[in-house]
Structures are given as C-alpha cells and as structure tokens.
Amino acid sequence: MESDLIKRARAFAKRKHKGQFRKDGTPYFGHVERVMNIVFEFKERNRMDELFAAALLHDTLEDTNTGISELRENFGEVVALLVVELTTDKLRSQVVGKTEYLAGKFSNEKAISSWALVIKLADRLDNISDLDKMDVEFARKKTKETLGILDALEEKRELTNTHRKLIAAIREKLEGFKL
C-alpha cells in the first residue's frame, strides 16, 4: 500500500509538471513516475518513502515554480534536502560544461549523498531509455555525456551495490544503441 507521503508527492509533482512535455511529446510527469519505479526496482531498503517522494519531486526545483520552503513544508526536511541535492546548478553547469559538472557532482559524496545518487542514476537510466527515438547527434552527445559521468563515478567514488546495479543497467542500455 502506498504511503500518504508518496500520494502527496505524486499529486504535487503531477500538478507542478502539468502542461510540461518531454522532447518526445509525452507528458513530463510520466518521467518522474518512471524514475520512482526504477528506484523501486533497484533499491531494497532504508527510508524508501522519502526516496520515492524525492524521485517524484526530483525536477520540481529545476523545472517548475517550486521553492525549497514549499517542499520542506509539504514533505519534510529529508525530502526537501534530497531534491536540493538532485537539482542542477545551471550556471555552474554552463560554465564548466554539463558532463564535467555532473561527473564532478556525482563523484563528490559531499555534493550528492548515496541516496540522492540512486535517484540521479535512475533519472539517467530513464533519460537514456528512448535515445533510439532521438536525433542521432543528440543521442551521441547524451551517450558520451553519460559514459563520462559513469567513468568518473566508478573511478572516484565508493559505490553501493545499488549504484553498481544501476550503472550496469545504464551501460547495458547504451550498448544496445546503434550510434
């Protein structure tokens, strides 16, 4: 049975992402639902409700008019801080380049916790799941970016079994593309 926290996070994310669409034209909310389901598939224990809620809300600070205080009031400190960790600093990303920024952030345990990294890897797995339907140049760029991030992670960070399983799933998915 689904907890009240997850129900509230789902309703909030659905409302906040209303009218937003992915590059393929599908409603954006489907992406956050898939990310939550990937977390469910790969993660086995420890504060699962907070992880599921943060997965549903992971793009609200970045892509909607949501503020940290609104997340804190509605979902508590743990969920709000996870979402903050999951939010890309767009200026820093532009200055150093997206691949370098994300590789550095993901590899730094002080910048992104183990829990948030699970959600970020689930997000990346969903983001690459439809590369075969994208423009070839975009797909090549996303593949190169993803491999750079994974290589840095594996080289610089202590990874959990969950992280390793998600990384393996991402690499397997990328191998399936004919680019």
Image: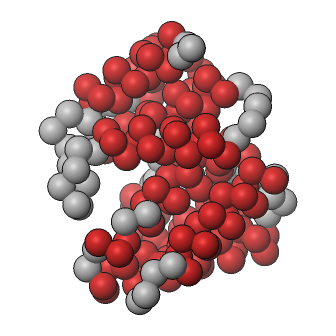
Report whether 174 appears left or right of 135: right
Residue 134 rendering spot, x and y as whole percentages: 28, 74
From this viewpoint, is residue 83 visible? Answer: no
Picture quarter with the C terminus: bottom left
Q: Which of 91 and 137 is in front in this view?
A: 137
Q: Nearer the viewer, residue 12 or 130?
A: 130
Q: Residue at x 20, y 33 (%)?
A: 18
How many discs mark residues in the rendered view?
0
Give the quarter of the image for residue 167: bottom right
Residue 96 rendering spot, x and y as whole percentages: 49, 74
Identify the residue at the far top of this view.
Answer: 4
Picture quarter with the N terminus: top right
Report whether 158 appears left or right of 58: right
Q: Does 47 appear above or below 135?
A: above
Picture colour scheme: secondary structure
Q: Does 100 appear above or below 162?
A: below
Residue 110 rendering spot, x and y as whole percentages: 73, 50
Q: Does 47 appear above or below 109?
A: above
Q: Does 61 appear above or below 148?
A: above
Report whether 117 appears left or right of 95: right
Q: Which residue is drawn at 50% across and 20% down?
A: 6
From this viewpoint, is residue 107 visible? Answer: yes
Residue 97 rendering spot, x and y as whole percentages: 46, 75
Q: Residue at x 44, y 66 (%)?
A: 128
